[in-house]
Image (tube, grey):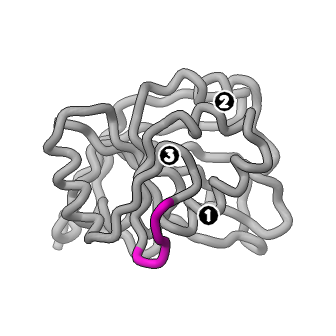
Amino acid sequence: MRELMVDLIVSLDGCAAADGWPGLWGMGGPDYFAWLDRQETRTTLMGATTYRLMSGMADEEPEAFAQLEARDKVVFSSTLTEPLAWANTRLVADDPVEAVRAMKAQDGPLLSTLGSLTLARTLLSARLVDRLRVVVFPVINGATGRERVFDGYPDVRLELVESSTFDGRLQMLDYRPTVLDRPPLA
């Protein structure tokens, strides 16, 4: 059975992006990029918005996206149509929960989300996520932050599996999540 990992990058206050800041808040460094290059083989899952953004960036910077280009990718969308231009990409217009449940039942590499906050939230709420990996960037985007990652999530207990520090500033926290039906004291 395949595992599903939700990969998230966030500011300390839980934003996925911020107006006026560069990608990765300008803090990606050699340790972090080397760690990304060492990731195990995976099938990348994403929604239409992330697909449009990432495939466009890959067209502009093919060397930077070569590893992602080579990966199998699955895009969940009711608005996109085939054929998709990005190599190794399959479109799924069906319910993502049922599609991912079926993918997890098959043999194959790790399944991992890329961006796609709505997809990640949906899959976690459906109790399909085996690992939740968060890379925390040391910034607070109180005035400029957008896309608050955890808004709309259910209550979730997290068991820390692994942690690392990259470039002396980025924290990677890898958890096994348990979705709770209610808070422990309710």
Q: Nearer the viewer, residue 9 or 93?
A: 93
Where disc 1 sits, the SS reads helix
Q: Is residue 143 something that shows in the picture?
A: yes
Where disc 2 sits, the SS reads helix
Mark 2 is surrounded, within 10 Å at the Cα level, by few (under 14), some (14 to 19) or many (20 or more) other residues, namely many
The residue drawn where x is 34% and y is 70% is 93
Report the magenta stretch's main SS. loop
Where is mark 2, residue-wise? 32
Q: Is residue 134 left or right of residue 52?
A: left
Above-or-below relation of 181 to 124: below
Above-or-below relation of 79 to 125: below
Q: Earlier in the sequence, mark 2 or mark 3?
A: 2
Q: How many numbered marks are there?
A: 3
Where is mark 3, residue-wise? 134
Quadrant in which residue 19 is drawn: bottom right
In the image, residue 50 lies in the stretch drawn in magenta? no
Stretch of the chain drawn in magenta? 78-83
The residue drawn where x is 16% and y is 36% is 1
Where is mark 1, residue-wise? 52
Q: Nearer the viewer, residue 13 or 70?
A: 70
Q: Earlier in the sequence, mark 1 or mark 3?
A: 1
Across and down, in percent, residue 53 comes to 65, 61
Distance from disc 1 to disc 3, alpha carbons, whole Å, reads 23 Å
Distance from disc 2 to disc 3, alpha carbons, whole Å, reads 13 Å
Q: Nearer the viewer, residue 79 or 148?
A: 79
